[in-house]
Image (tube, rainbow, N blue to C red):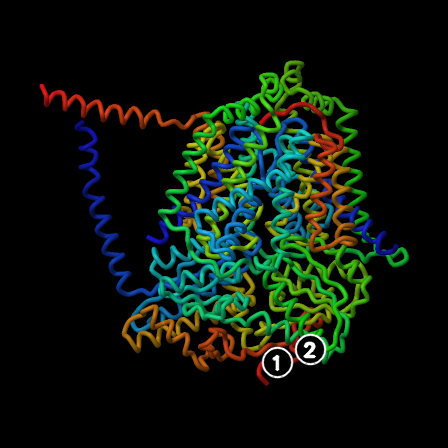
């Protein structure tokens, strides 16, 4: 039984990191209908900025995190201006935006590798010792990460559902053309969305860096978040969170009780089965989408 | 020479796989990030046929391709039945290909698991590739201009309308997927017998996304576009070696720049046709005729 | 019609001059240089390998050239990146041999690339020295036939698995082993297998066999099972030190305190800053120690000059380079030119040649270094410490 609880606890803490990234995917998808493949670059960039703010400039953790968030927002909004907006204005199909994102991703990640080097770094904060309930270990950092993820998601929900700019974003997500005819400023919406996703990926990067390590290709994990957001239902924020938690717990349970070697085989199998019963994801909008 | 050969052969293998993806993604509107899995299935099957059963290479390639095509139904049938589309279908293909890689990594009987399938010989030579690419292009062209191909385009444009016109959605999609996986499988077989070695690590998600990029770059509803870009995407990183560590940075930048300046893809909606060849041929024969006539006169 | 030709006439003179100069220069170079190819990873997750080796090779080559080169020839390094992709490794090897006309090739660091490269070496008759490709079949194919142009400077997987199992059973008194293996890495699987074989032979028991895939960063699910299995030693032969570091950190987070053992893939100094505390008391096998005082000046100078720490890959790559330098000297002495076949012959017959880390003898029938000593090391106070030296065949 202890093993079971331990696996559940680990699974939730993995799911919490996935969910920060998955929400970013969902947010971009809900308005622009494309999967932003440049997230892993943003995430690694955010982690590196915080890492160097601490190790080179001896900033306190909160200041480093803040700087990282601001810089990642700049990168995210900047890449929207340069790589996506011209495509969006020309109404290019979403696949093209995906490929453009892929290119931006390749470029940024390899720049990080070139500038900072490929070695794996430990994030320079002392991860507090875990505490134990019975024999089940619970990481304090995991709790903190979970709490902050939850707070950020709540803040996001408040913003989307209780403020005027949030209303604009939601209106755009239903129909971007009509929304702009009704007076919603498309560019402002784009700014908000990419600023928010930039901030989310920076936070995810910092947490991931603390939990694991900081290195240029750390963003490979975003593929899991992408899967989670798709299974949760593309463009659905609660779906992204649910999908992430399901994926996190599923992975640890499969590894714990079926086979760790075949973990991805079984977790993919379960996800495909979920998709067969919910072809639009668990909480996705139904409706036609085109290439 | 061998180096140029290597680029042409690797480029040709990429072209064959990309033609398969073009039929699925460019023409039928289903996008896959799991074609590396089909390449792996075809490659390993082809290798087993040649190595364990002494089947001639050409036939083994066809068996490998067919095997990959048949396996595609495992994911295709349930997915199309429940009308998975877009990113949902893409994720299902990704899961399928990762699952195949995992199984291959852990199958030590015959295929050598993570150590790879060793002891193969080099059978894929330049003439083999040139013939294979020509055949692949010819049959892909035949397919997309046939009634099946037109059905595929109809499905990609508007499924409901296509169904109203009497197109069987499930069958059309399954045929497109079968052919697409067949192409990938043949490409996998060619790759294995060029390397004289197969390892599950050949068939990572990077390979799948490179193929998708080649097709999108080349242009939707075009064969000649992906044909060119699939080749160029192999050659460009080689040309960019000049930049050393900057290579992939420049490569990424090129992606963005091309998308910005040519957002429909290089040859989007440019249907490959042999009209220019026919025109050229008729001109040539006309001239001959004229000169013959002139001679007679 | 006239305009283009006038432009051409403007351009013609400088163009011809540049071309002529280029021809002259390449002509000169071909006469007096020996090109050494290097197949490595400068981008991708394994980029740290290329970043710590290319500058070291360049330094050494500069040094040799400053001292007059090899028999009047200057050495030149041609390094290419593979992104850790086997297909890239194959095409750059062909490029090195057929376009750049290198005399010998160093690399790669992993076996999946070394196996197809061995075939290229044999067909083109250009020697390749693998640095850390440790699969048995790199130099001797699965039918037991030698690849005549393929060599390596590291030891093979069975050595390490054997030595680790021996030490765990006989010296540490461990009886129940759990494995955490990268199932997609031939290196990791190879060592795990040989360990298991020998450990069971000695009388030990395998109580858990957990796996993960290259690139995974999350091991707590597997480690929780290991904790549950009652194992007294965990063997994690990770190919990259990142996995080792993360395994250490996550064991600590789960309160799992059994002994961990690994192999030379762990041996990168950055591991100590990444998880030195958590891996206190862990054991690993290795061919050479960077802490050896003999290397201290080299390490310090290298880090100062390139802002990168020297690691195990730096050492092995330099070993390969020293071996090639020796073979070139021999070839130039014997046949008067750096002929790749003569270089191969010299490599095959190396006997007690001083390379960067030690004296090396090549086994002519396997092309593996002969009786390369294995060090058993432990991590103590976030530093490497040698606890035992195995000399195979003793």
Q: Residue at x 27, y 27 (%)?
A: B281
- B292 vs C92: above or below: above
- A189 vs C166: above or below: above
Which chain is home to disc 2? C
Image quadrant containing the N terminus of chain C: top left
Picture coordinates of residue B36, whole percent (x, y):
55, 45
Extreme-right residue of the structure: A134
Horizontal relation, residue C292 to residue A147: left or right: left
Judged from the image, the secondary structure of the residue bearing numbered disc 2 is helix
Horizontal relation, residue C302 to residue C20: left or right: right
Which mark identifies residue C390?
A: 1
Which mark identifies residue C167?
A: 2
Q: Residue at x 69, y 41 (%)?
A: A225
Judged from the image, the secondary structure of the residue bearing numbered disc 1 is strand
Q: CA distance from mark 2 to mark 1?
A: 10 Å
Q: Nearer the viewer, residue B269 or A186?
A: B269
Horizontal relation, residue A107 to residue C240: left or right: left
Picture coordinates of residue B204, whole percent (x, y):
57, 48
Q: Nearer the viewer, residue C301 or B163?
A: B163
Q: Residue at x 73, y 30 (%)?
A: A236
Picture coordinates of residue A64, whole percent (x, y):
69, 47
Q: Does residue A120 appear in the picture of this structure?
A: no
């Amino acid at each position: 039984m202890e093993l079971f609880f331990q696996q559940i606890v680990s699974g939730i803490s993995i799911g919490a990191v996935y969910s920060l990234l998955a929400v970013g995917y969902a947010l971009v998808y809900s308005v622009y209908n494309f999967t932003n493949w440049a997230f892993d670059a943003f995430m690694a960039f955010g982690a590196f900025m915080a890492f160097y703010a601490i190790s080179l400039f001896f900033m306190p953790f909160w200041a480093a995190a803040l700087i990282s968030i601001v810089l990642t927002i700049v990168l995210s909004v900047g890449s929207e201006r340069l790589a996506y907006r011209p495509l969006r204005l020309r109404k290019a199909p979403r696949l093209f935006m995906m490929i453009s994102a892929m290119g931006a991703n390749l470029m940024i990640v390899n720049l990080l590798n070139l500038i900072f080097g490929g070695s794996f770094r430990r994030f320079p904060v002392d991860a507090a010792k875990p505490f134990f309930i019975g024999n089940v270990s619970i990481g304090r950092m995991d709790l903190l990460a979970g709490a902050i993820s939850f707070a950020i998601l709540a803040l996001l929900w408040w913003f989307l559902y209780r403020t005027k700019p949030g209303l604009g974003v939601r209106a755009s997500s239903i129909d971007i053309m009509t929304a702009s005819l009704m007076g919603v400023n498309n560019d402002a919406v784009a700014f908000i969305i990419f600023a928010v996703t930039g901030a989310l990926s920076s936070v995810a990067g910092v947490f991931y860096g603390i939990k694991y390590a900081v290195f240029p290709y750390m963003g490979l994990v975003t593929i899991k978040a992408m899967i989670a957001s798709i299974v949760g239902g593309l463009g659905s924020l609660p779906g992204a969170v649910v999908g992430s938690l399901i994926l996190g717990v599923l992975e640890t349970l499969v590894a714990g009780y079926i086979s760790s070697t075949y973990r991805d085989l079984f977790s993919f199998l379960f996800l495909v089965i979920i998709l067969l019963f919910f072809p639009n994801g668990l909480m996705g909008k139904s409706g036609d989408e085109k290439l | 020479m061998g180096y140029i050969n290597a680029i042409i052969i690797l480029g040709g293998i990429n072209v064959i796989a990309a033609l398969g993806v073009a039929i699925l993604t460019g023409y039928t509107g289903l996008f896959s990030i799991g074609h590396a899995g089909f390449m792996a299935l075809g490659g390993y099957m082809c290798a087993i046929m040649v190595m364990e059963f002494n089947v001639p290479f050409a036939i083994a390639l066809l068996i490998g391709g067919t095997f990959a095509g048949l396996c595609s139904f495992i994911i295709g049938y349930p997915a199309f039945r429940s009308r998975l589309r877009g990113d949902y279908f893409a994720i299902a293909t990704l899961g399928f290909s990762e699952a195949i890689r995992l199984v291959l990594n852990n199958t030590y009987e015959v295929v050598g698991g993570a150590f790879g399938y060793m002891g193969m010989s080099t059978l894929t030579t330049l003439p083999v590739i040139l013939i294979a690419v020509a055949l692949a292009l010819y049959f892909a062209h035949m397919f997309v201009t046939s009634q099946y191909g037109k059905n595929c385009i109809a499905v990609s444009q508007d499924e409901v309308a296509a169904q109203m016109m009497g197109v069987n959605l499930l069958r059309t999609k399954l045929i497109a997927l079968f052919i697409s996986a067949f192409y990938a499988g043949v490409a996998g077989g060619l790759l294995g017998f060029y390397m004289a070695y197969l390892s599950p690590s050949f068939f990572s998600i990077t390979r799948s996304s490179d193929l998708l990029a080649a097709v999108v770059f080349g242009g939707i509803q075009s064969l000649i576009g992906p044909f060119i870009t699939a080749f160029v995407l192999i050659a460009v990183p080689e040309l960019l070696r000049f930049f050393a560590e900057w290579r992939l940075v420049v490569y990424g930048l090129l992606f963005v720049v091309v998308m910005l300046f040519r957002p429909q893809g290089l040859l989007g909606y440019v249907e490959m046709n042999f009209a220019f060849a026919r025109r050229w041929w008729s001109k040539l024969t006309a001239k001959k005729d004229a000169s013959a006539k002139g001679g007679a006169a | 019609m006239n305009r283009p030709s006038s432009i051409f006439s403007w351009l013609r003179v400088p163009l011809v001059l540049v071309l002529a100069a280029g021809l002259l220069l390449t002509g000169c170079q071909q006469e007096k240089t020996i090109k050494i190819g290097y197949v490595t990873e400068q981008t991708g997750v394994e980029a740290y390998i290329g970043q710590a080796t290319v500058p070291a090779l360049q330094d050494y080559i500069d040094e040799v050239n400053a001292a007059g080169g090899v028999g009047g020839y200057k050495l030149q390094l041609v390094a290419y990146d593979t992104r850790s992709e086997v297909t890239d490794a194959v095409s750059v090897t062909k490029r090195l041999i057929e376009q750049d006309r290198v005399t010998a090739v160093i690399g790669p660091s992993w076996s999946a690339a070394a196996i197809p490269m061995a075939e290229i070496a044999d067909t083109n008759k250009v020697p390749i020295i693998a640095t850390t490709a440790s699969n048995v079949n790199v130099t001797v194919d699965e039918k037991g036939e030698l690849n005549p142009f393929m060599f390596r400077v590291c030891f093979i997987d069975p050595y390490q698995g054997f030595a680790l199992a021996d030490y765990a059973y006989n010296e540490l008194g461990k009886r129940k082993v759990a494995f955490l293996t990268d199932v997609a890495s031939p290196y990791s699987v190879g060592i795990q297998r040989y360990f298991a074989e020998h450990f069971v032979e000695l009388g030990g028991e395998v109580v858990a066999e957990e796996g993960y895939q290259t690139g995974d960063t999350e091991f707590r699910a597997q480690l929780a099972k290991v904790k549950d299995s009652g194992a007294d030693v965990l063997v994690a032969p990770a190919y990259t030190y990142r996995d080792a570091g993360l395994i250490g950190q996550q064991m600590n987070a789960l309160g799992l305190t059994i002994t961990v053992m690994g192999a030379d893939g762990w041996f990168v100094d950055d591991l100590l800053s990444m998880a030195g505390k958590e891996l206190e008391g862990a054991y690993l096998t290795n061919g050479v120690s960077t802490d050896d005082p003999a290397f201290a000046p080299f390490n310090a100078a290298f880090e100062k000059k390139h802002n990168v720490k020297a690691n195990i890959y730096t050492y092995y790559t330099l070993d390969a380079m020293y071996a090639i330098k020796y073979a070139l000297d021999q070839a130039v002495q014997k046949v008067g030119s750096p002929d790749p076949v003569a270089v191969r012959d010299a490599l095959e017959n190396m006997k007690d040649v001083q390379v960067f880390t030690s004296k090396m003898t090549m086994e002519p029938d396997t092309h593996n270094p002969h009786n390369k000593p294995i060090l058993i090391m432990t991590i103590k106070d976030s530093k490497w410490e040698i606890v035992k030296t195995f000399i195979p065949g003793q």
